[in-house]
Amino acid sequence: MIWPAGPLIPATDAYQNTAFSSGFVNGYLTMDTLGALVFGIVIVNAARSRGVVSAGLLTRYTIWAGLIAGIGLTLVYLSLFKLGSSSGGLVPDAQNGAVVLHAYVQHTFGGLGSVFLAALIFIACMVTAVGLTCACAEFFAQYLPLSYRALVFILGIFSMMVSNLGLSHLIQISIPVLTAIYPPCIVLVLMSFTLRWWHHAPRIVAPVMLVSLLFGILDAVKASTFAQYLPEWTQHLPLAEQGLAWLSPSLLVFVVVGLYDRLCCRQVVAAKQ
């Protein structure tokens, strides 16, 4: 942001025509929502291991951790926005943002800057990898006949093998998967703020998540090599061209089950009277 490597370059066609939806869908690749769901467990368990058992304190610490992470990520992404818009001309045919970032650091700080960038990325990725590996191993150890240590080893080896595919190839593989699982995760996060509104929250959350998952799978198939096998009607869903076909059905189901919950609540109150 302080030392741009060139003038502002025009946005691509996708971001000129559908900036919000393109940014929203491509934001799946950050996996911030998925990471937040996992790291929330890590933060709570870390606080409990320090003797914090009060639900109020656990909530407070989790909120503070979320605010700090949110502010930090906002600053990082604003910097990356500026970097891409002003320094993308260094590598016009870059396949991903990592290429632009490396080219900028090499252009501005030279070889020593590239070494520092590599060390910085290693530390950041190591922290994320350790947290995710521990959280996933702790979760699956409750349901699989494997010890926590064995699961950590298996997940570590698997992650190491997958990481050698390369960033561009990994993005191509992960796009359909993330497109399918991100909608229910978004629904879960948003619905968590409305739990006190309902007489029976699972009656609301479960159907909306299910519908978002089903239509998210349709978006995922559309983003894969199997798009030609989708029926014609899937191409005419609202916001289907933007990769957000799950949004309208999820909102519709949310309204329907919300009204049903209110109706059931009134019937229960009337029966008690």
Image (cartoon, grey):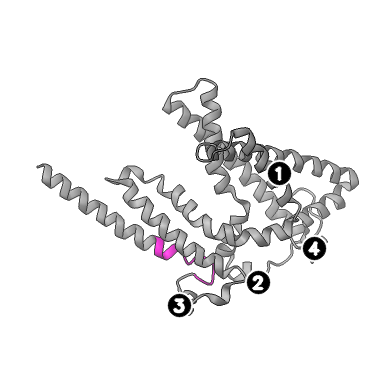
Q: Are marks 2 and 1 in contact (CB under 8 Å)?
A: no
Q: Position of residue 144 (x, y in %)?
A: 53, 40
Instruction: State the residue position of label 4.
Output: 89
Q: Mark 3: few, some, or many residues within 10 Å (few <14, many ≥20)?
A: few
Left or right placement of residue 1 versus residue 140 in this view: right
Q: Position of residue 212 (x, y in %)?
A: 44, 59
What span is in magenta? 240-250
Instruction: State the residue position of label 2.
Output: 13
Disc 2 or 1, which lies upstream in sequence?
Answer: 2
Dot 1 lies on which element? Answer: helix
Disc 4 or 3, which lies upstream in sequence?
Answer: 4
Q: Is residue 174 above or below residue 151?
A: below
Left or right placement of residue 50 versus residue 122 in this view: left
Dot 2 lies on which element? Answer: helix
Instruction: State the residue position of label 1.
Output: 157
Disc 3 or 1, which lies upstream in sequence?
Answer: 1
Query: Does the magenta portion include 193?
Result: no
Instruction: State the residue position of label 3.
Output: 233
Viewer-nearest residue: 232 or 58: 232
Q: Residue furthest right?
A: 111
Mark closer to the observer (2, 1): 1
Query: Does the magenta portion include 247?
Result: yes
Residue 133 seen in the figure? yes
Name the amino acid type tagged 2.
Asp
**How many numbered discs?**
4
Name the amino acid type tagged 3.
Trp
Separation of disc 4 and disc 2 at Cα? 16 Å
Separation of disc 4 and disc 3 at Cα? 40 Å
Name the amino acid type tagged 4.
Gly
